[in-house]
Amino acid sequence: MTEAGSYSKITENVLVSVTPIYLSDRSRPEDGLYVWAYQVRIENQGTRTITLRHRHWRITNAEGHTETVDGEGVVGEQPVLAPGDIYEYTSGTPLTTPSGIMVGSYDMESEEGTLFAVDIPAFSLDSPDAMSSLH
């Protein structure tokens, strides 16, 4: 298991932080399978209660193949966050290449019924098998 750095972004007073973790014990590079977990932390820094309604992900591998994932809530839940609340969850994704990138957004609903989007920061998925390069 290899943990990379954390990536964070604030949108509409909601802080989203993501930490990707390469799962070497679940990956099989010889078969073109590279598996990551990612830990997400959502903090409501605003003054209103919000509910996470939907998620939208764009996952791109090193060859430029992009997959989109849309669905209700996260890990089967639609968490409600009062001001100051934090919600954390862990999920995962496989890739067919040793590196890639993920980015996305959450559709939130305020207690007044207003819908708004919260950005999930782009984060890099780089296995120890990925070729490193300097730019």
Image (cartoon, grey):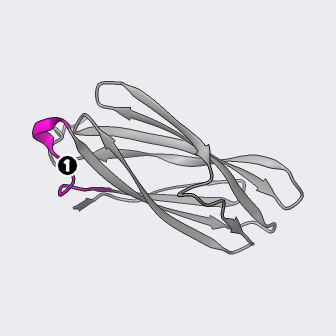
Dividing the picture into quarters, in which one does residue 126 lie? top left
Crowding at mark 1 (Cα within 10 Å: few <14, some 14-19, many 20+): many
Q: Residue at x 24, y 44 (%)?
A: 34
On whether residue 30 falls in the magenta region, the answer is yes
Find residue 120 and report its horizontal and vertical position in percent.
Answer: 55, 49
Dividing the picture into quarters, in which one does residue 24 lie? bottom left
Residue that badge 1 annotates: 27
Q: Inspect the image, locate mark 1, and give the three-letter code of the amino acid beneath it.
A: Ser
In terms of depth relative to the viewer, which is nearer, 64 or 95? 95
In terms of depth relative to the viewer, which is nearer, 102 or 27? 27
Q: Is residue 94 above or below residue 61?
A: below
In terms of depth relative to the viewer, which is nearer, 81 or 53? 53
Quadrant where the C terminus sits is top left
Q: Residue furthest left?
A: 30
Number of residue marks: 1
Find residue 21 and report its horizontal and vertical position in percent.
Answer: 31, 57
Q: Residue at x 76, y 47 (%)?
A: 116
Q: Is residue 116 above or below residue 89?
A: above
Quadrant where the N terminus sits is bottom left
Find residue 45 and report its horizontal and vertical position in percent.
Answer: 69, 67
Q: Residue furthest right?
A: 112
Q: Magenta segment range?
A: 21-32
Q: Is residue 124 above or below residue 31?
A: below
Q: Is residue 58 left or right of residue 86?
A: left
Q: Secondary structure at mark 1?
A: loop
Find residue 6 and report its horizontal and vertical position in percent.
Answer: 41, 59
On whether residue 82 falls in the magenta region, the answer is no
Q: Residue at x 31, y 51 (%)?
A: 36
Q: Residue at x 21, y 40 (%)?
A: 33
Q: Residue furthest front?
A: 76
